[in-house]
Image (cartoon, rainbow, N blue to C red):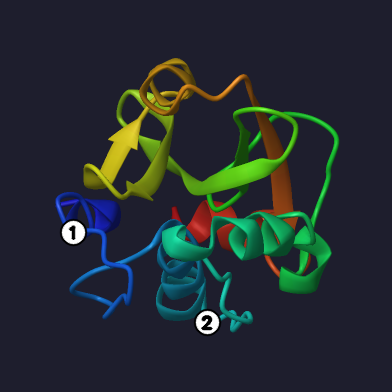
């Protein structure tokens, strides 16, 4: 079993209880901490306070996430933009089928999708990629 398969099927919860339930932000935080040993602040995602969630997602640098040049690699973060604001996130994982995105949705729980599937599932118009400042290419590829 690949490391990411243990998350697939876990439910979404407004008040997450990792590793049993997640929000999209808590899933990213949990994987960074437990897979890579990188601690980040909670990426707040509460659908009853979508305005606050969007405000927090507008500040990726607060979580150590920065834009980068080139193609995404494992453990990079995909921010989804349905309109003009970021309102969902997921994490890139290397699978036998190539790079896919692990994310947690209110209606589906934790799922694994290609970029095209993710855009279709969420209704997002585009994906904006970010990379964590403390995750080197060597670490990302080693832990993938």
Image quarter of residue 53: bottom right
| Residue 85 makes an appearance in the image | yes
- Image spot of residue 101 (x, y percent): 43, 38
How many residues crowd mark 2 within 10 Å: few (<14), some (14–19), many (20+)? Answer: few
- The disc placed on residue 106 is none
- The disc placed on residue 37 is 2
Image quarter of residue 108: top left
| Residue 78 makes an appearance in the image | no
Name above or below for residue 57 compared with residue 119: below
Q: CA gap, disc 2 to disc 1?
A: 23 Å
Image quarter of residue 81: top right
Name above or below for residue 91 compared with residue 56: above
Give the residue displayed 41% in from the left and 79% down from the top: 34
Tell me the SS state at disc 1. loop
- Image spot of residue 55 (x, y percent): 73, 60
- Asked whether 22 or 75 is in front, the reply is 22
Name above or below for residue 42 compared with residue 81: below
- Image spot of residue 125 (x, y percent): 62, 19
- The disc placed on residue 11 is 1
Give the residue displayed 17% in from the left and 59% down from the top: 10
Q: Nearer the viewer, mark 2 or mark 1?
A: 1
Is 51 on the left-hand or right-hand side of 65? Answer: left
Number of numbered tags placed on the structure image: 2
Is 41 on the left-hand or right-hand side of 112? Answer: right
- Asked whether 136 or 6 is in front, the reply is 6
């Amino acid at each position: 079993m690949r490391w990411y398969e243990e998350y697939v099927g876990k439910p979404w919860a407004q008040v997450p209880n990792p590793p049993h339930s997640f929000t999209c932000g808590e899933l990213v935080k949990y994987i960074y901490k437990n897979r890579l040993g990188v601690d980040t602040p909670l990426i707040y995602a509460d659908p009853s306070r979508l305005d606050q969630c969007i405000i927090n997602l507008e500040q990726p640098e607060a979580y150590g996430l920065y834009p980068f040049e080139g193609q995404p690699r494992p453990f990079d973060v995909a921010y989804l933009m349905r309109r003009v604001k970021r309102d969902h996130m997921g994490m890139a994982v290397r699978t036998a089928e190539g790079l896919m995105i692990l994310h947690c949705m209110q209606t589906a729980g934790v799922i694994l999708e290609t970029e095209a599937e993710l855009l279709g599932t969420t209704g997002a118009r585009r994906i904006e990629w970010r990379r964590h400042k403390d995750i080197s290419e060597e670490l990302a590829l080693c832990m993938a």
